[in-house]
Structure formats: structure tokens, C-alpha cells
Image (tube, coloured by chain):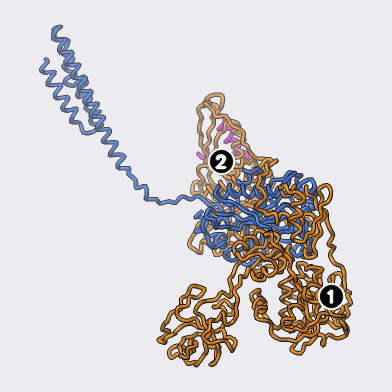
Amino acid sequence: MLDEIAAARRDALARARGVATVADARAIEPELTGRRSLLGQLKQRLGGLGPTERKDAGQALNAAVAEVEATLSTRVGELAAVERRHRLENERLDLTERLTRPSRGHLHLVTQTHERLEDVFIGLGFTVSEGPEVETDWYNFTALNMPPSHPARSMWDTLFVDWGEPGTVVLRTHTSPVQIRVMETTTPPIYTVVPGRVFRRDTADATHMPVFHQIEGLVVDRGITFGDLAGTIEAFTKAYFGSEFTSRLRPSYFPFTEPSAEFDIQRPDGSWLELGGCGMVHPNVLANCGVDPEEWSGFAFGFGTDRMPQSRHGLDDLREMYTNDLRFLEQF
Amino acid sequence: MEVLLSWLNELAPVGVDVAALADTMNDLGLAVDGIETVGAPIDGVVVAKVLGLRPHPDADRMQLVDVDTGDGQSLQICCGAFNMAVGDLVPLATVGTVMPDGRAINRAKKRGEWSNGMLCSPAELGLSSDAEGIAVLPSGLDVGAPVFGALGVSPDVVFDLDLTRNRPDAYAHLGIARDLAARLHVPFAPSLGTTVDVDGKSEGITVTLDKRSACGRFTAHLVTGVFVTESPRWLAERLSRAGMRPINNIVDVSNYVMLEMGRPNHTYDMTKLEGGGFRVRSAHSAETVETLDGVTRVLTTDDVAICDGNDVVIGIGGIMGGASTEIDANTSAVALEMAWFEPSAIASSGARLGLRSEASMRFERGCDTDDMAVGARRFIELLRLTCPDARLHEMVDAVGSLPPRPAIAVRTSRVNALLGTELDSATIKDLLDPIGFATKIGTDGVLQVQLPTWRYDATAEVDVIEEVARHHGYGRIAKTVPKSTVFGGLTPLQRDRRLVRQVLVGLGITEAMPNAFLAPGDLERSGLPGTAITITNPLDADESVLRTSLLPGLLKAIAYNASHRRLGARFFEIGHIYGVPDEPATLPDEREIIAIALAGTPAIGAVAVLDELVAVLAIDGLRLTPTARPGLHPSRTAVVTVNSAEVGVVGEVDPDVAAAYSITERVAWLALDLPALLAHPHGPRAYRKISRFPSSDIDLAFVVDDSVAAFDIESTMREAAGDLLVDLQLFDVFRGPSVPQGSRSLAYALRLQSNERTLTDGEVAAVRKQIVDAVTRRHGARLRG
């Protein structure tokens, strides 16, 4: 009996080791260890043996079945791993074969710039204000301390609109009219910036567009000083351009501010970028908006924003920003 | 304004450190646009005499010039200029010379002929801007001598200043020197005209001043002992370096006094001045005068007419003198006019006449009201360099309305409150006195500041505060950051607008920025007839109409990209349109519109974008109603309403309009009045509890007449299903043989679910029946088997 068990064991082990696929292994499992297998038939014969013999043969038989099952299970594991490897290998993809491009849209550079600028000023506690692009003479000039025939009006090449009395409605030449609108409708304190589109009667070239963009800032509060203006410009400079940038103010002239200044940004290499104009809000402007200049003081600043992406991205011609050419827009 | 270093130093010892002076001027608000060194000698450039001129055998644009450089030998030069003659003296850059631009002059063959140096133009030598031809030098110079020494040219530095409107004083060397001296703490005590005494009455000159508002003051001096000749070389050189052409000794002195003191003036030949004097009045309408430039000008009553004693116009006040009294070779006595004209009168007069002169530019900004006596003496002082017997006679003075120059109160506390400084009264006085704002320290920290006659711009306390800041130094004011006392941030509209932009970008749509101006005909081409507002003074007729729709601009953008073989462009724009308002209004009806144009996409693509926007903004109550709109496809367009209020339109561009822009693709179109849309209550969405119970799905297909909108079928299904319906999707639309003509099959997948229990088959069947009954009854639909 023990010899028969040994022979059946050898035979079963050999067949278990020899299976070629997981499916085959599942198929032959009953033939190796099932009731009708050689080992199974031997098991049925145990009952006819004497107690000692039966014990020995039973142990041998159990050991043989366990060994065969383990061997088959190991074999199944090996085969499953190989088959998985083959199956997945057959799914191999060249991930650089890209038939479709990502189809994300792109924000215009002007929008990207304005959002960055707005976020800097929001961080400084400012709101964002807006106003119409077609404006009355009052908001664009007169309220800004430039009554009719004021010589400083010639500082802007104004586009007039055929609306109302001739010469009374303009395409705003700057975002400053929104200062007036904000002061007329808001009781100070005011901390706000005004990004927007402005218009000049100017021929388009690499650095000028007849339609372009500005951002304007206005602060009106008790005790606001020229030092506050300089400090706000400096804080903006560092927040927007980087902590290694600094700013300076130089005396200048604008009818709606006094003292007035140009402000320049110094790059880390020491060179200067003339950015914009600023100053303390002129008392006449405050008074025009019903704000008492003895109680409140304020500052305003403004600069063109179209050139900011120019330096950021190395563009050399403003006109390209307005061609709406996807080959341009999709770069940013 | 061109300012010479040597001239400044004559008026105040400001020094010769050019870079430091430029920094100081910038810091004072005298913006330095350029710095040019002029008249610096170039080693190796000598006086050469032209011995002969021969054609170049192999070049038409060059000739061979034989010159003598002092050794009696003939030296051959190839030269591209032809303006010299045999015997002329010309400047020769000899072999080895390095020109200011870095070019080294070598012995070289030009088209086979040797050239032993280069003949120079005035521009190449930095003597003037004249680059036409070779400089022909005055005769009598030593041949072979260095040119600069022989000419007596002295080097100088020219600062090109970009001046602001509020600095009338800065249009003069005197004003710049005063500002610099104050900042640099050096003496400023120019002694202009002090060598001249006044010599008896100005016989034969009377002044009648009628136009007293535009002409605040008119003074005249008789000047005798005059003859016309050339100016001294140095004086002519200064004028040309400062940008004015030398003419003769009298005109040059006149210009010199203007550039030095900012004091415009005009000279009349006494023998041509009829009627014994001047009358200043308003010009008569259509009165004419021939100005010095030989042009006959037609005047209006706004112009200031300078007339002679016979009331004949002989000049336009503040703008330009007349030809009839011009200085000529026979002039022996002149009447010297020094006047003050009201700035805005001169500005409008000059603008209307299209005439701007150095004088009018200064009058426009506001000249000194009280520098005439010194100016006249300085005039004579300089004139005596050529006319030693020139004599100045007493001023005839007529005063009209001059701007008041009071002493004004300036509060020290106000200075510091506005600037953020802690300056005391004495320090402020020390800043103001040197620039002529004579300051007296009063009680209670109030200063009495005398406004100078040369600062027309300064009228109020704040003007003086600006001067304090300027001379204290903007850079010395400590930078402080005010702590905002408001809550910063975006408004809800601004936040939503950013969200909309981000969603559109995520949907693969790119932001365009077309021009806000259209060409006439653009609107018609877009199928949008009707009135549009125009620009009064467009630079270009193609940009003369304010857009009433974003459609033309976006179609142009699509067409532009298609023409560069980029089909399927997907654009959005958020921009303003400017319509004619329904009611009379001060301003046009300006609205902010968001428009989306998707090339290569049928109308339903725009509806999908709309659905996404409405979903992200959490706007309820949306409805699409078929409509026809100009420019849009008549059977593929719907008006978009929210709670029955119109907020925009969605659909497809009329194919004829697209074709008018040479667009061959379908273009899906969505335009929304963004503020109107966002004015509807929206967001935040209320949380809907997630059910723990299983859901049941049912599919329903209805055959529906084409006239019934799917939207209405869905509304009915939602209503009939009630709260148990958690999802409803249209998954198939079928038109074909098994469906009657004029209708289609709409197949929907519905998911039903309760928050409280697992739905029984009976409950699902009941809901299904309610839905089917409602749809079939209300819309004449038939459930498809």
C-alpha cells in the first residue's frame, strides 16, 4: 500500500508540475486529488486495512494529497503571474503616441495681468471698482480739475463720441473718471483699484495702441500722506514684481493730483522701468466730489498694464496681443 | 527744452558733474530725456584745402578729391559728397582718426581708388545736425590746423529736458539754474543786464492797451544805435546747440534772452513802425496779417492784434510778429516789445491758427509778469557785443489784468499732514526762499509765502506744499503703508465673472479681445442693421463706429484664424457694447456682454456651454424659447430667459453672415448680458442629502411631434415624477422609418430613489405610469414600445 501511495504521489506531483495553464490546472485538480484520482481511490481502500497499517497509510496518503495540492497551487500561482505578465504586456502603449491635444482654452494676457494686479491690491485691503468706457466731459476732465479749455487737456489725444452736445461725450482717456464716480457714491474711507480699457487718438505701433488698458488706484481716508503713497507703491512693487525690486517717485505734473509724481521701478540689475503717474488727490478734485479736503486726504496712482505682459513674456510688439491669433493666445 | 551746461554755470556755479546734475534735475522733476556732449574735439581732424575735384573712374556716387593738409602735398580722398569747390577749406579726418561713433579711419581702396582719410559733414563732427554734404569751413583758417581749435569750438553738454506744464520757469536756463542752485546750496545771483543804464525817453512810442484780459501787460523800449551784423561765434553756437537757428545779431539776442530768461520778446524796425506806437486790441473778424514766415493769416476776434499807431495789424500777440516791421539790413533803431499774454488765450489762438512758436509755447505756460526791465537791459548788454553804441530808452508800460501774486498762508501742520513729514517752519522757509517763494514765519505755524511772478502755475497752498516736497526731496519722505480701513476683495459680480472665465477656459474656449470700434458696414455685414453711435474724430474711418454687438469682432477673429488654417476656433469675449438708449440719456446704453462663438460647432454646442455656466453659477429658472434674431440662424436660435426675464440669446450664426466673413463652418453663438444674468438670485446651492437606499432605473421613449420642445417634455416628467426623481438624461433622439414624419423619438433614462426606503416594484411602476400619463396627455406624445 505504501508503495502504491508513493507511486501515485510521484505520478500526481509530476502531472501537477507539468500543467501548462491555469485553466489546465483547474481542470486536472480532480484527477490528482479528487475521489476518482489514484490517491482518492487509495483513500477509499484505507478502510480495509489493519489498524497499524491504516494509520501509516492514512498519514502517508494525507501527506501526499497535501503535497500535491500545494504543488498544484504553487504552479497555479506561477502560471497566473506569467499569464498576467503576458496579458498586460500585450496592452503595452507608447504614451508618446498622442492623437489628441489637450484642449484647454486660454485667458487673454490682459485678463491674466489684471487678475494678478487685482489680487496684489486685494491683499493690501483694496476693493475693485469699475465704470463706463464712454464718459461725460465732467467725469473725464472737469471733475478731475480740468475745466473746459484747461491746457492740460491736450495731454491726452481724446476721441469724442457723437452723442449729446458736440464735444461733451468722450471715450475715456484714462480710468480716472471712475475715481470721481467712486467718490461721488462712496463715503470715505476708500481703498480701491480700477482696472479698465481706455482710449486715445493714437496710431497703433509696437508700443502704443489706440485702445489699451490701465489700472488706477485711489485711497481716501483720514490722515493719508505722500509717504503712504510712496509706501503703497513700494509694497505693490515688491508684491507684484518681487522682493528684490524697489521703487522711487520723481516730481511730475497731473492736474488731478498735487504733489504729483512719476513712479519708476528698479530691477535687480539696477535698471529702471518708468511705470506710471501718481500723487496726492488734488483738493479741487475732492471738493468736486463733495469730499472735504480738510477732513480727508488721499492719493491716486495709475499705469498702463499692456506693457506688463510684454516684459513678463518678452513680447516686443503690443499689436500682437490684439490680433486674436490662436497661435499667439495659446502660448500663455 | 535743451539746456547747456556752460550756460547754467554762467548763471550759478552748479558744477560740471554731468551725471550728478542729471540725477538732481530728475529728482527736481526736470526729467532728463537725453544728454549729449557737443563740440568735443576729435583728434586727427584737420583743416584741408581742396586742390582739385575729379570723377571717380568706377563710381558715379563718389568723386576723387585732392586736398592739401598743410605740407603742400596732394592727398587723394574718395568722397560721396559734391558740395565743395576747388579752393574750399574742408575738415579731413586723417588716417588713424577714431570718430565719435567708434569708426576708425584707415587708408582704403574704394572701387579701386585709394582714399587717404574722410571728409566730414557737420553732423559727423558733432557741430550740428546737418548731415547733408561736407562742412565747408570759413576761409582764412590755417591749412593743416586741428579743425576744432581753428574754429574756436568749445565743448559743451546739452541736456534734453522733458518738462511738465506746471513749470513755466523751467523753460529758461535761469529757472533751471535757480532750481539747481537751491537744491545744491550754491549761490544764485545772476547779474543780468546790470551793465546797462536807461538813456532818456522812448521818443515816438506810445502804447494803447485795449485787450486787457488777453494781454496783461505790454511794454516797449526804444533801442537806438543798432545795425545788423553777424552774432559773436559763441552766441550763435549756444543758440544752435539749444535748438535755434542763428539769423543776425538782433534776432539772435532776442532769442538768447528768451532761452536764458524765459522772456519772449519781439523787435520792430522803428522806421517801419507807422503812427508812432502800438495799439493792442482784439483782432477784427477776418482781419489779415502777413506773419514773419511769409504766410497771410486770417484772424478772429479771439486773437490779440498788435497794431501800429495807425491801427494796422503788424503782429499776432504772443504768437508771431508781422512781416511789415521786420528787421532788415538797414535797421538802425528798434522798438523792443516785452509783454505778458494770458496763457489760455494764446493756447487757443495758436491752436486755431496752427502756429506754435518758442514764444507762444512759453506764453501758454505763463511767463514772468515782471521781468521786462531786466530783460530789456540784458538785451542791450548782449547787443552791445556787436553794436557797442546801442542805447536803451525808458520803458513804455501798459498794464492790463495780470494774475494776482499775493502772499498766501501755508500751514506748517498742513505741509506735514499731507507729506507725512515733520518739517518745522524754519526748514520749510529754507526750502522755499531760494526758489523765490519768499517766506515769512508767522504765528501759530502759519507761513506767509509770496508767490513769485515767474510761477503762474502756483496759486494755492497745495502748490507751495508741492514745492516744499520737491526741494525736500521725494526720496527723503519715509515710505509708510496705510492700513486699509475697508474690507478688500472682489464684489460678487467680479467673483462670478472670474468663475465664468475659468469655466470657459476649462471648456476649451479661448478669450479674445477684438477692437471695440467697427468699420462702417461691419454691422450690416453681420446682419445687424440699425443705428450705432459714431466717433466724432476717428483716426481711421475703419475704426469709427462703436460696436452694438460682440458678433462682428468675434466673427473677424474666427475668420482671421481660418485664413491661417486654424478651423474650429473657439472664442469668448467679455466686453462692452454701446447702444442707443431707449430713453434720452446723458450717455449711450453701455452694457457688459459675454459672448461665445464656436466655429465648427452647431447651435447645440452653445447650449451645452450655457448649461454649464448656468450650472456653475447655480441659476434656476432658465428657459429657451425659439426666436429669430438679426444675424442668427432663423430656425436655430432661442432667446434665453431666467424667470421670464430675457438675459441673452443662444444658437447659431446665420450662414449668410458667416459667409460674409468668408467663414465656411457653422458657428455656435451665445451672448448673455452678464450683469443682468447675475442679477438673478443664484447660488449657493442647498445641500441635497445622499440616499443610503438603492435606486431604480427606468427608460422611457416617447414619440413626440417636432413642434414640442424636449425641454417641455422634461419639465412635465420632472413634475409628474416628484421628489423621487434624482436624475433624468436624454440618451437618444431618433428620426427614421419607424417614427412618423414630423416627429421624433426621445429616449430618457430616469433614476428614482428615496431617502427613506428601498422603493418597491409597485412604487416604481406607479411613478412610471404617472410620468407616461402626463407626457402623453399633455404633449400628445406616444410611448414607444
Kindly state the secondary structure of the residue where label 1 is placed: strand
The spot of residue A25 in percent (x, y) is 23, 29
Q: Amino acid at mark 2?
A: Arg
The image quadrant of residue B454 is bottom right
Compared to residue B368, the image places residue B501 above or below, namely above
Mark 1 near mark 2, Cβ–Cβ under 8 Å? Answer: no
B132 and B173: which is toward the camera: B173
**Label whose residue precedes the other's in the sequence (1 or 2):** 1
Q: Is residue B482 magenta?
A: no
Task: Please tell me whether residue B494 is drawn above or below residue B217 in the rendered image.
Answer: above
| Chain A, colour shown | blue
Residues in magenta, as a range: B766-785
Label 2 Cα crowd, 10 Å radius (few <14 / some 14-19 / many 20+): some
Residue that carries the numbered disc 2 in the rendered image: B782
Numbered disc in front, either 1 or 2:
1
**Can you identify the residue that label 1 sits on?**
B219
In front of the other: B597 or B151? B151
Rendered shade, chain B: orange
Magenta-drawn stretch contains B769: yes
User: Horizontal and vertical percent for residue B103?
Assistant: 47, 75
